[in-house]
Image (cartoon, rainbow, N blue to C red):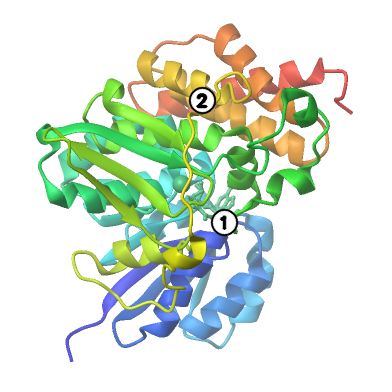
Amino acid sequence: MSERRTLSIFGATGSVGLSTLDLVRQHREKYRVIALTANGNAVELAKLAKEFEPEIAVVADEAAYPALKDTLAGTATKAAAGPAALVEAAQMDADWTMAAIVGCAGLPPTMAAIEAGKTVALANKEALVSAGDLMMAAVEQSGATLLPVDSEHNAIFQCLAGGRIDQVRKITLTASGGPFRTYSLDQMRAVTPAQAVAHPNWDMGAKISVDSATMMNKGLELIEAHHLFPVGLDKLDIVVHPQSVIHSMVEYVDRSTLAQLGSPDMRIPIASALAWPERLETNSAPLDLARISKLEFEAPDLIRFPALRLARAAAEQGGATPAILNAANEVAVAAFLAGRIAFLDIVSVVEETLTGYRPNAPHSLTDLFSIDAAARAYASGQMDKLPHAA
Ligand code: NAD
Ligand code: MG
């Protein structure tokens, strides 16, 4: 038997992290986990560490360290905590790294893994949206391999095996449209966090579920695609496809369009990145088109979903704009989930922050983090002025 591939999983306790570990559980003979990380849930992380026996388990939140250390005492797994420990874990000798922390908080370890020239499976889209130019330059410089995990980008990556990037005429990202696809703006005014996180097709973390509801998720994905697949923004398109069966499409110059299809189960794109360039068996539900019977498509509505317009403009402007869009969105989504602002305020706050705060383009990660912090502060100031804000 050949050596097992070694894996580091950042954001192991989240939706993508747990789906990744579920695949490892089914293929123990192929993979060995060497590092697992979480934010502050020491109990859950320790449970996973006992099952997968990594060399190290890291909590980002230092307050969770005592609990992690006590639970792991006497096991083969070392406990660690804090931002520096997270970055050190990213520099360990792993064959494959899953970047599945949510938000820009995932940027330091993701960049550390990239700068170390590793193979990085990227789910953490906020890091790429925020630091796209810096991250792609680091990939180029270190020779790291970036494997897209986001289902759309993974689909495009697979479809691009059918031709060369300079032969692409158009890339179409599909969007489910989220839980409020058919809602009027008036109906959206009063929706609750519970309604927003109840996605019709996918079972995901709270932040990305709210992003799907505002369609900011598709906006972030447009920027993500712009960095991963350099065909030009004018060749990147979005179509709403409520069944989430076609995960995205690539049209070539001969007008041949390749699509990737599958059940809406993140274990499928994760398996593709995990086994790449091989294939891995999964026990995900097979695609049953006769049962689904109908695939529907519609153009996205930029009036009801202005996040799409803001994100495209941010991609066009480049510089600091995508980082501001992302930072303002992160704090606004958190405020909505905490019941402090209304659903439609999320994108308004993002737009106000983009209008009011216009710094120069970041030239380093240090620049980027100060832009990120200032955009968060600006967005928070805007939210304090809102009538709903508690
Ligand atoms: P989640 O909320 O379920 O999990 C997030 C993980 O990140 C957890 O392990 C959490 O402990 C960790 N974390 C949170 N804040 C942290 C911090 N400040 N420092 C360190 N770790 C922190 O999120 P998810 O749905 O698994 O999404 C993870 C990423 O993958 C996001 O960027 C999301 O956009 C992307 N993604 C998710 C899905 C999906 O189906 N869930 C699909 C495509 C892309
Ligand atoms: Mg996606």
Is residue 203 in view? yes
Note whether 112 is above or below 66 in the view shown: above
Labels 2 and 1 touching (C-beta < 8 A): no
Disc 2, ligand 2: is the CB inside 8 Å? no
Apparent side of residue 11 relative to residue 30 in the rendered image (left or right)? right
**Image x and y of residue 377, in percent:** 65, 22
**Image x and y of residue 218, in percent:** 48, 35
**Residue 72 occupies quadrant:** bottom right
Residue at (54, 46) in percent of width and height: 242
Q: Which mark is residue 361?
A: none
Quarter of the image with the C terminus is top right
Disc 1, ligand 1: is the CB inside 8 Å? yes
Kind of residue sitting beneath label 2: Leu
10 Å neighbourhood of mark 1: few (<14), some, or many (≥20)? some
Apparent side of residue 39 relative to residue 324 in the rendered image (left or right)? right
**Image x and y of residue 50, in percent:** 54, 84
Residue in the foreground of this view, choosing between 179 and 97: 179
Residue at (36, 29) in percent of width and height: 237
Cα–Cα span, label 2 and label 1: 20 Å
**Residue 203 occupies quadrant:** bottom right
Kind of residue sitting beneath label 1: Trp
10 Å neighbourhood of mark 2: few (<14), some, or many (≥20)? many
What residue would you read off at disc 2?
308
Residue in the foreground of this view, choosing between 151 and 239: 239
Apparent side of residue 10 relative to residue 41 in the rendered image (left or right)? left
Is residue 116 in view? no
Q: Secondary structure at mark 2?
A: helix
Note whether 228 is above or below 359 in the view shown: below
**Image x and y of residue 215, in percent:** 56, 34
What residue would you read off at disc 1?
202
Q: Secondary structure at mark 1?
A: loop
